[in-house]
Amino acid sequence: MTEAISVYKVFENNFLDSKEKKLVIYGLGPGTQEILSHETGFNILGLMDGFREDGECFGYPVLSEARAAELQPDIIVIVARKNSTRIIAKRIESFCRQNGIALYDLDGQDMLVADSVVELQHPYFQMSADELWNAIESHDVVSFDIFDTLLMRRMLYPEDVFALLEQTSGIENFSKARQEAERRLYREGEQPTLQDIYREVQKALLLDEVKVGELYRQEIETEKKVLIPRKDMVGLMKRAVDEGKTVWLISDMYYPADMLREFLSNCGIDGFHKIFVSCDYGEGKTQGLYRMIQKETGVDSWLHIGDSPEADEVAALTAGLDVVMIKSALEMVEISTWDYLLRLQLNLAERTVLGGILAEGFNSPFALYQSEGRAEIRKAFELGRIIFAPVLMGVFFWVMDKCTGVNNVILWGARDGYLFYRMHRIYQKYIQQKKLPRPIYFYTSRMAAMAGYPTCREDIIYMAGIGFSGTPEEMLLLRFGLSRDEVLPRKEGETIEEYVLRHEAFILKKARLARERFKKYWNSLRITEEQRIVFFDLVSSGSCHMCAEKFIERKIDGLYLTHILEDYERKKELHCEAYMEEDYLMQLKSYVSSNYEPLETIVMSTEPSLEGYSKEGHAVFAGEKRTEKDFEYLSKVQSGVLRAFEEFCMLWGDGKAEIRPQFAESMYGLLRKKNTRIKTRHLAEQTVTDDFTKRDFVMKDMFD
């Protein structure tokens, strides 16, 4: 865990030039308290907050919007965690604009500057399925290219198939030898078969017949795994067949026609009349294959559809054919707002993930029709597969790397660990050699854990000081678990701390009972003293981790997507690591860490939040606030994540998969409206409630 940098120091550095201006600080949290504890030299008029409009805090007046407008501040500085900063900015944006007040976050970022959408222009954005069909309809004979036209690979680049084979086979330099063998044969003017290529590979790597035969078969099997249909193109081809057109498939390929038929059939593609393949005819498209087809069939001209400018356009036009060009998924990315993904320096695991994403997002060659370059996500399944899966897979493989071992137990904390637990069970099917940690779906929640935390007055004071948007009476009911009969009337002028401490005996008694019930649940998990315990949570300051350690009196290692630093000694003593490391208190700088709420929503189980444990140690749940529509949507998003994950595992095998935070960050950036048109809106319409703080988070507030 990295050390926290002073919030005041960050504030001072970023607003040093604003000491002569009138400032208001928005936020009543520990960051604001630290800033105001210094002799700042800043002209701070007062404080604002979404839940208070009067009174005093840290020696400064709390201002309503009306009072703030009267004081005419020059700048409002939001001092809050990054995810809260974004929501606050949207809440007060119109107020600031109406009153001519500048709005900044703690980093000095102007929060009134919109994340603007750039409209790209390209002629291909006018390519539609209707336009292509009109061309098909006017011809009696139509030919289609195969690879990247009717079929595509779930890999970023074709040669990644060879890199994958090198990894799974363990044969050093295989990928390089495989590529060089193919290039050399084509350079010499041949139209090789796959067998020809492997004879060259055998010579280069000095392999025996058995090993080269295994590699040959593995390449074919890998192709079967990665090949998928471009559904819209297959639909047009089948429509042409149904309309009585003569349909041919023409390919420059080292697979012979019979093998291609098998690949096509596996993808549901049939009904065409003939396949013409370069390795069967000894001529490629640019060498005279079209002329050979004309001579064999007696047909001089037809419509050809493909993606290669040289082989499918220039060569076909030279042969006197009509041509319509489509773009491969990779070419479409290059002209879209997703093009930044291709500039990333990626390892093989990341390229494999990205290849699967592009195969989903750009499966249709018409995906950019009238799009201004922004791809579109219409379905919940696509949202899970394209945007959420890369981040969750990155976190999962990072956790596996941190806790792989026969004597380890991984507690996937409820409810954020639910989808990871399912991923873990899938992963177990594909890992043969590694000793994976034992997975446990661990029933916990901040509400249930903190109910047993207080063992002394100082613990109660700490809990009472954590932000809460309800009344003190509600805090006693919800956070401390008291019954209504146990809640005393509040005295006039009594502080919240004084009021809560009058209930000390009740609170400590309830906490003791909560710990006893937790221990019964813990004992049911059958974790031995010899086993290392690892606890996972998505985004946390460590409350559940801290409580579990206290209750079982054992050290637990914590792993998080993002660990929120808190200035509390017991939490500082926790041993924890984060996938997305952040470098100072309050500010979560990555886009993933600043916008984790959608992730938190879609990884959850369908069970309600944990309220506590029964006297037998069984999980007791709170009431469910989600609807059947919410559950249906959740199931579809999670299905998309799990599909992407399992497809990756099927390809990857036993090798270590490293999906780095930088890549996950870039993929999650597709959530931004400047990159993607997200048409599935149910997630944005949800409201998430944190019972511990009694605060609602409206998801639409975070969507661009």
Image (spheres, rainbow, N blue to C red):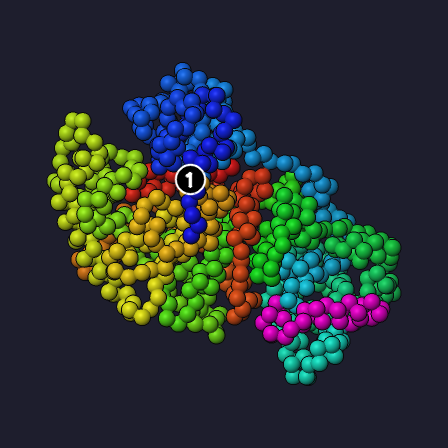
Crowding at dot 1, Cα within 10 Å, few <14 / some 14-19 / many 20+, comes out as: some
Query: Vertical placement of 487 versus 639: above or below?
Result: above
Q: Nearer the viewer, residue 368 or 118?
A: 118
Tell me the residue at 12%/40% (across/down).
485
Res 444 seen here:
yes
**346 left or right of 82 in image:** right
Tell me the residue at 74%/79% (across/down).
203
Tell me the residue at 56%/48% (across/down).
666
Q: Quadrant of residue 577?
A: bottom left
Query: Which amino acid type corresponds to the residue marked 1 in the rendered image?
Result: Ser
* Residue where numbered disc 1 is placed: 6
Q: Nearer the viewer, residue 372 or 668?
A: 668
Res 232 seen here:
no
Q: Determine if the magenta segment contains residue 183.
A: yes
Q: Quadrant of residue 36?
A: top left
x, y percentage for residue 87? Answer: 43, 35
